[in-house]
Image (spheres, rainbow, N blue to C red):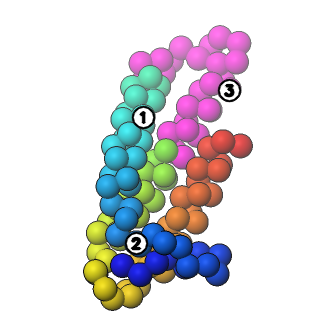
Amino acid sequence: MPGLVVFGRRWAIGSDDFVLPGAFELFLRLLWWVGILVLYAVHKGQFSCPGGALLHSYLLVLLALLAAIICTLSALVYVSMQGTRFGVTRCSAQLVRLEFVRVLLLWSCHV
């Protein structure tokens, strides 16, 4: 695959290089999402302690952000698998957009 062009610079990474790292990260994020969902389901009615409302809202926002990251990562892996060996296809442009969305979502988790 030809190199991706991001920020006006051609990088030495092709769009098909995101399949295995993306699939591994997708697996870890799914495990994390299921773990948080189980934690929330087990303690659903027990948020009456001081700061319990904040914890409740934090878990809900975390579940929503992880779901959005999982959807974006699934699309990224799917588009990465569509690339051809030598041709420049639309998947390169789609991958750049998906990476920007993914970086924004990851940044919002850490703010």
* Residue 52 highlighted magenta (yes or no): yes
Residue at (37%, 58%) from the top-left corner?
A: 74
Local crowd at mark 1 within 10 Å, few (<14), some, or many (≥20)? some
Magenta residues (range): 41-65
* Residue 18 highlighted magenta (yes or no): no
In-front residue for pair 27/71: 27
Sequence-wise, which precedes: disc 3 or disc 1?
Answer: 1
Instruction: For mark 3, give the secondary structure.
Output: helix
- Residue on which disc 2 sits: 15
Which-is-in-front pick, marks 2 and 3?
2
Q: What secondary structure characterizes most of the magenta part?
A: helix
**Quarter of the C terminus within the rendering:** top right
What whole-number distance in Å separates the C-alpha atoms at marks 2 and 3?
40 Å
**Amino acid under disc 3:** Leu
Local crowd at mark 2 within 10 Å, few (<14), some, or many (≥20)? many
**Amino acid under disc 2:** Ser
- Residue on which disc 3 sits: 54
Residue at (29%, 69%) from the top-left corner?
A: 81
Local crowd at mark 3 within 10 Å, few (<14), some, or many (≥20)? few
**Quarter of the N terminus within the rendering:** bottom left
Q: From the viewer's perspective, is residue 69 above or below residue 90?
A: above
Q: Is residue 89 left or right of residue 111?
A: left
- Residue on which disc 1 sits: 32
Instruction: For mark 2, give the secondary structure.
Output: helix
Residue at (37%, 53%) from the top-left corner?
A: 21
Can residue 26 be seen here? no
**Amino acid under disc 1:** Trp
Q: Is residue 91 left or right of residue 50?
A: left
Q: Position of residue 48 (x, y in %)?
A: 62, 13
